[in-house]
Image (cartoon, rainbow, N blue to C red):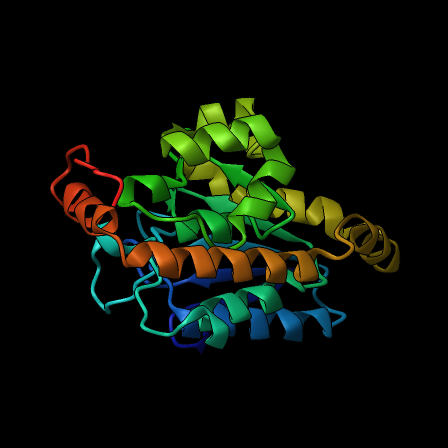
Amino acid sequence: MTIIAPDLGIEVNDFVATVEIQRPPNNFFDAALIETLAATFADMDADPGVRAIVLCSAGKHFCAGNNYGGKEDSAKSSMPRSATPPSEGNPIYTAAVKLFATQTPVIAAIQGAAIGGGFGLALMPDFRVACPEARFSANFVKLGFHPGFGLTHTLPRLIGQQQASLMFQTGKRIDGEEAARIGLIDRLTSQDKLRDEARALASEIAENAPLAVTSVRQTLRDGLPDAIKRATDHEFAEQYRLQQTEDHKEGIRAVAERRPGNFEGR
């Protein structure tokens, strides 16, 4: 696989591009990585030799969230820890809006964890292929925090308001089989066949008339980048507000210590 940017690799075969995030084992992201993904996908939009994209990750997990502190700290992985006020925006979410503007169909191949912001990244593609060992969680409330990366728009749109509310308010983690049952993923396969299955789905799309595929996709995703902009603006404002609370500090400690939080509502 050819490296095209730090922590990112790509190969193209028969109109299908495979883009691999290379930050194993947890594949934490930051603003630079999301910006690189958005720019890479934009280049592929302009390339007639790419008709579908498979997004995958090296190592144990698809994406365990955001690496805000530069260290692989899973307790902090979901949180944009920043002194930047909401009025100045969040560079991660600015890049995410660009990513959601991708015009080429994207299929995610998901192994291991897609947690917090990593869960948000997993919902950017059109389709998801996962294995039973995959784990999905919007664990923000366990951290005294608000969901981000556009999840408050994408998750209800995908699995319905009730199931999304259940995931958001409990912070529960579901496996690949449960994800398939509620419509969170599109195909369930064994871990050793995960990428092959994702590429097979991408090939099913790529063999069709590209102008027609782009047209119907634009119809179905009409207004999505603008919706993600509105969602992330609100999410970041709430995240910034809740960062100031004692519950948020307790949530970080509780997750790091692998125990329930002792929250006091302040």
**Quadrant of residue 77 in the image?**
bottom left
In the image, residue 220 above or below residue 171? below
Q: Position of residue 197 (x, y in %)?
A: 56, 40
Which residue occupies 11% across, 42% down?
A: 257
The reply to whether residue 1 is visible in this rendering is no
Q: Position of residue 64 (x, y in %)?
A: 33, 50
Which residue occupies 70% across, 56% down?
A: 224
Which residue occupies 41% across, 51% down?
A: 118
Outermost residue to the front: 266
**Quadrant of residue 7 in the image?**
bottom left
Q: Position of residue 170 (x, y in %)?
A: 37, 30
Which residue occupies 78% across, 55% down?
A: 222
**Quadrant of residue 47 in the image?**
bottom right
Outermost residue to the left: 257
Figure disc tally: 0
> Depth check: 15 or 183 in front?
183
The reply to whether residue 85 is visible in this rendering is yes
Instruction: Describe residue 77's horizontal placement relative to residue 182 as left or right.
Output: left
Q: Position of residue 259 (x, y in %)?
A: 15, 34
> Depth check: 240 or 175 in front?
240
Instruction: Describe residue 177's horizontal placement relative to residue 210 as left or right.
Output: left
